[in-house]
Amino acid sequence: MKKGFILLIVVFTAYNCMSQNETIFRLEKKFRIATNNVERILVLDSLSNYYLYFTTKQDSASYFIKQSINIALRSNDNQNLILAYSRMGLFLWLTSRYKSSMEITLKGLKLSQQYNIPYYYSALYYNLCGLDFQISDYKELLKNSKLAYEYLKFSKDQFFDTKAKITSLLGCAFGLNKMYDSAFYYLDKGLILSKASSDLTAFDANCFFSGYINYNLRNYSKADSILNIGMEHCKKINDYEWLENFPPTLSLVYLEQNKVSKAISLAHTGIHYSDSIDDKKFVAFSAHTLYLCFKKINKPDSALYYLELNNQITDEVASTDINKELQQIEFTELLTQREENAQQVLENEKNRNKIVLYVFITAGIAFIIILTLQWRNNKQKQKANTLLQQQKEKVESTLSELKSTQAQLIQSEKMASLGELTAGIAHEIQNPLNFVNNFSEVNGELISEMKNELLSGNKEEAISIADDIKDNEQKILHHGKRADAIVKGMLQHSRASTGKKEPTDINGLADEYLRLSYHGMRAKDKSFNAEIKTDFDASIGKINIVPQDIGRVLLNLFNNAFYAVNEKRKNPEGFRNPRDLETYEPAVFVKTKKINDKVEIKVSDNGNGIPQKVVDKIFQPFFTTKPTGQGTGLGLSLSYDIIKAHGGEIKVETKEGKGCEFVIQLPV
């Protein structure tokens, strides 16, 4: 079981460590040509992982990890030091030095918290999960697997592709804590993720944990099926590390089903697999399974043989673990010494900085003495200079006060604008969120009702409820898009333009966006028609503007104009005389004209116009005359900001019931 968990906490695979054609020799070449410590640490990290998971040279893996730690300590690189600690914790766990693994893992977590570096939390909590699994502390396993899952979103580890394994691990942890609904939820989710993962072994991990939980639940038939699927997949992709988990576990499943011959055969297979990768603990696991099998069929000689084999291997492993712990003391002392050396280097650097500071102070004092001597030799001249200096200081003081007052006014204006934006956002976004929340709650109740109807066999009623759920989902989508539009508009309003001005044909730009707006309205309402009139001054030529920004302004004005005439057409109550409705033809007029050193753009319509009482508010953020849900109130505000940024002006002239006209003036 341990070797299966080993691959669960492996935070990278061969395909993530290097490209398919990249060999260990290329990694070593990369290290030789690396130009800085960060590059060297990352190459050493790749080397350590290659040796750890794809060769039998684990001592080489340890060597490269220690090299990473030494470089990170010397360069005071806390981020990559945490990465190296997480790798060392994993290496120590894989080599059964559990106490040392926990110590260095906790050291990495402490350093992460101290410097607020969350990028390797997942890898560190992985290590703790392995230790929890080893000592069967399932409550801590659940706690740490939740943290590993949560912090995966912060991960910057270039070798991480383990979301599927983390999810499956979380499901297993829930299962071992007898929280089976959550267990199967995360196991099913992990299965979906594993099929999309670049880590082919993720599927094997999910199969093993799913089968193991079903075995614990005594769902032997299902455990049998899942474990066999996983074992065949391991064989297909040559995943020997996971493969050794399946035979002894399946053997226990068959033993519970009284299929003793199959159980014995699989346990022997398990010993063969574990021997091939020199995993003595798993050989002991398979030997113990054989002991149970022969005991069940009353073959005491064979049972005794495998019991003694299990005990012998267990004693050997325990002795080896003790020796490894003693060896780790030497490394811990070396690590402490390296950290002390790094601290000493830091102190020496501080001392050098102090010396440099003292030199500068001494030079400054000498400079002041020279100035004082010169001042004594030039007393009369200094008096005149002093008077000028006083006047200068007075002017500078006045200027400083003016700048301070200006900064305060700008800050006040920013805060006022921020207050308006905040209030508008809260008001505008609350309504669609209320709809989303309400329909979501209703869907929750409908789903419960549909389950009850399905259990009762009322298929037609269940289908009817499903239709209601589908309708509600469409409403949720509609209001979600509405909230999205509000947020996008708000971001556009608050974001400073980074566009570059360029010579632009304003007539062509206006004509393009006019057609775009008209066809956009036609796409929304097939019955919409309007007369478009243009009067472009050909003598204008090209003017220096940001075409995307000015295009956004024009598009907003055209959309508003077409909306206004369409609303007047659809609402006959706005006409005093019914005959006026019959003769009314929606029209939008666009005119450009060059006036001295300015270009004037007029956008007119014959809609209902803007009420005089709100004309002064139309350029304020989030103010709109459109019905709820049809406008965010940010278009004209954004247009106003863009025109001002171009050094121009925008104003409106309106007659209620007759239409309105927007006038833009831009410098040539």
Image (cartoon, rainbow, N blue to C red):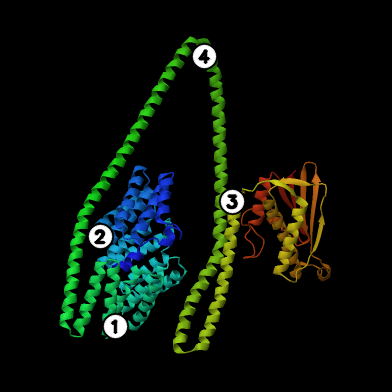
* Image height of 3 relative to 490, above or below: below
Q: How dense is the environment of label 2, judged by Cα within 10 Å: few (below 14), some, or many (20 and up)?
A: many
SS for tag 4? helix
Please tell me which of labels 2 and 3 falls first in the chain: 2
- Residue behind mark 3: 495
Q: CA distance from mark 4 to mark 3?
A: 53 Å
Label 1 with label 3: CB-CB less than 8 Å: no
SS for tag 1? helix
Q: CA distance from mark 1 to mark 3?
A: 69 Å
SS for tag 3? loop
SS for tag 2? helix
Label 4 with label 1: CB-CB less than 8 Å: no
- Residue behind mark 4: 382
Q: CA distance from mark 2 to mark 1?
A: 35 Å
Q: Is residue 258 visible?
A: yes
**With 53 as the anchor, is 622 left or right in this view?**
right
Please tell me which of labels 2 and 1 falls first in the chain: 2
